[in-house]
Image (cartoon, rainbow, N blue to C red):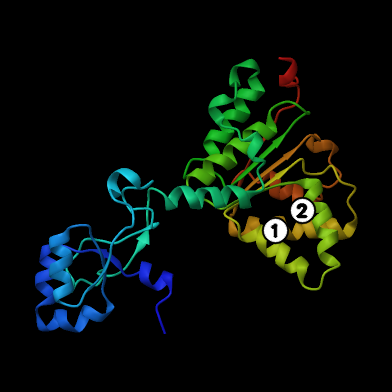
Amino acid sequence: MSDSLGDILKRVVTISPTDIAHLASEEGKRQRDTIRSMTRDEALIEQARRYGVEIIVPSYANVGEEAHCPRCRDLGWIGKRVPLNHPDFGEAWPCPDCQHDNMAEQRLRASGIPTAALKTLDTFDPDWHMKAAEACKAAYDFLDADALPWLVLTGPKGCGKTHLVRAVAYKLLQDGWSVRYIKGMTLHDAFHAAVREDGALPDLITAMTTVDCLIVDDFGVAQETPWTLGIWENLFDLRYDALGATVVTSNIRPTDMPILSDRLDSRFRDTEVSNWVDMAGVPDWRQH
């Protein structure tokens, strides 16, 4: 049975004169059948073939100039330049130049953030209102390694909550986190849809609790029932107990939010876990 492409890629290495010499040794002879090497040096190719080493030659004429990624030659994988008897010889790792970008795109697509509405903290103007500045600082603080794991922003429509949390989400994605951004109403509807499918609700809760950072935007706008309130409490309890990074926004003031049971209110207001900023009084930035 021939090797799969994945098997071959995981054994790609760059051959060197030292490696060629090693192939003549008894230890080298035992390794020849599992070696895959890549080079464009004709002398090395000829030398290696004498020892029975399979050579993979790139199809493009000038690797450094024509490949989109000169580091991995568009394979997406790189090997370490180590002696043949090194434990890392023949192993492959994702190319940090091109695979990083591919994985970042995949994380962005999976996050639920509208790609047409990506935000950054640099484009948020914190100077137009004192509460906006406080919320912006809270967003920056949340990204700090020693930050409290929860961030809660409440305030009227147009005060900048969504801008800030999408900016936080985008920065975390760039840092390699898995992020799930979802509207409160969307997740509320997903609860109902999942309960109609056998086993879907536990899977949904697991997905929401195991992601590195969960962001619920516009929380509390749906007409909740005791059943959905119980689901929300379970979801937030699991993230609270795990100290999972969690961001919540709502345009309903804390005192007017009927969904906030005593249990949820206690979670949101726990100053050892959560940083809650109420942006009441901040005008609509669109009219700023």
Given residues 183 and 37, the one toward you in this image is: 37
Dot 1 amino acid type? Asp
Which of the 4 quarters of the picture holds residue 162?
top right
- Determine which quarter of the picture holds residue 75: bottom left
Q: In which quarter of the image is the C terminus?
A: top right
Give the residue type at disc 2: Arg
Judged left or right of residue 12, residue 186 is right
Q: Which of 104 and 13 is in front in this view?
A: 13
Where 199 falls versus 95 (above or below)? below
Q: Which of 116 and 225 is in front in this view?
A: 116
Secondary structure found at label 1: helix
* Image quarter in which the N terminus is found: bottom left
Label 1 packing within 10 angstroms: few (<14), some (14-19), many (20+): some
Position of residue 157 relative to residue 128, above or below, is: below
Residue located at (49% from left, 43% from top): 174
Q: Do the residues labelled 2 and 1 touch (CB within 8 Å)?
A: yes
Whether residue 176 is visible, yes or no, is no
Q: Mark 1 points at which residue?
A: 237
How far from the left and from the top, in percent, is residue 182?
Answer: 71, 47
Label whose residue precedes the other's in the sequence (2 or 1): 1
Mark nearer the viewer, 2 or 1: 1
Describe residue 63's horizontal placement relative to residue 246 as left or right. left
Where does label 2 land, which residue? 263
Secondary structure beneath label 2: helix
Please rate how many residues cluster around mark 2, counting C-alpha atoms within 10 Å: few if below 14, some from 14 to 19, many from 20: few
Q: State the CA–CA distance, disc 2 to disc 1.
A: 9 Å
Whole-percent x, y for residue 105 in the image: 54, 48
> Image point 48% across, 40% down: which residue?
144
153 relative to 8, above or below = above
The residue depicted at 57 percent of the width and 25 percent of the height is 123
